[in-house]
Amino acid sequence: MKTYPAYMADDLEGYWHDLALVTLERSAPASADRYELYREDDEVGQLAFLTGYGEGMYPYGTPKNDPQPTLREGLNTVDATAEPMSARGWKGSLEDQLVFDYDDGTIRNDTLGNILGETHLGVGEYEAMLTPGDSGGGLFLADEDDWLLAGIHTFISGDQPVGTVGDIGVSTRISSYTDWIDQSTGVVQEPEARSTEPPSRDSVPMEVSEGEGVWFMVELGSPASREVSVDFYTRDGTAEAGYDVTLQGGMPICLSVRRVMPPHISLKLFAACAHKA
């Protein structure tokens, strides 16, 4: 696990950069859901989708007798970053935190609305709040037809029991850390194999870094005067199908190419097979 360098969590000094990256012993199955990061800084005012495995609780603190662990999800609106809360004694990396309150449709319990002077009474029956055990869960924002990871749940501010109407939820703001995440994981790449033009014969790489695409070169030893076909497939080696490599159409065939070659023209065939980490 790699923790953000300036991380600190202290009841007196506040929460600072509450974010870490976890390296799995092996790649997650290809069937596991994967989400892109939210990279814009316009989170405030957007409807957020909250997920987590925290305790089941009704709005006014009555526990639910649900089996544990249970994935719970619901909606809330990102009211602000935590910066205005410094006037209330909050400490920490406040500009890098997103805050939202648990509304019940009344002005009395619109905690952040009363602090910020901007009334927002919630989203009705779909309104959700963090509860104990939700730390590390995700806050997602919509991007057309996709949900992007915009926050990681950090803590809840409120009277006991926390997670009830009027409380404030806090999530670490992903957009503040995308550079660090990219540098630490190396996921932002433009593999040469995705280009429309194949590399020259001498520049075809003999080795490929993790996460990159790869070119394969097939070269005839003599001119072709009839149809030439090339079929190839992948097999497990250091990368395992379904975990390290995403196969096309459920079959271990990356590409099949057929060309009719005029006499006296040699064939150089380049095929791109993208590796998905």
Image (tube, rainbow, N blue to C red):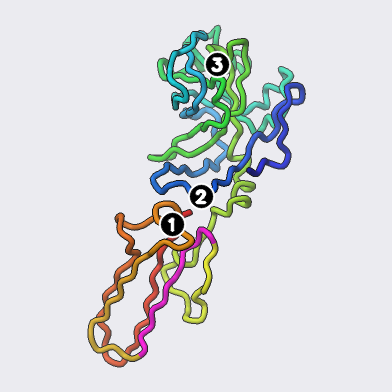
Disc 2 marks a residue whose amino acid type is Arg
Marks 3 and 2, Cα distance to the nearest angstrom? 35 Å
Rendered residue at 46%/22% (across/down): 68
Task: Classify residue 43 by image quadrant.
Answer: top right
Q: How crowded is mark 2: few (under 14 residues within 10 Å), some or many (20 or more)?
A: few
In what element is the residue under mark 3? loop
Range of magenta residues: 210-221
**From this viewpoint, which residue is outermost toward the left?**
226
In magenta segment, residue 215? yes
Residue placed most toward the observer, 35 or 119: 35
Give the residue at mark 1.
240
Q: In which quarter of the image is the N terminus?
A: top right
Q: Residue 163 carries which label?
A: 3
Where residue 195 appears, as percent x and y from the top left, is 44, 67
Disc 1 marks a residue whose amino acid type is Glu
Which mark is nearer the camera, 3 or 2?
2
Where residue 31 appears, as percent x and y from the top left, is 38, 45
Give the residue at mark 2.
26
Rendered residue at 62%/50% (across/down): 184
Q: Which of marks 2 and 1 is nearer the N terminus?
A: 2
Q: Earlier in the sequence, mark 1 or mark 3?
A: 3
In magenta segment, residue 51? no
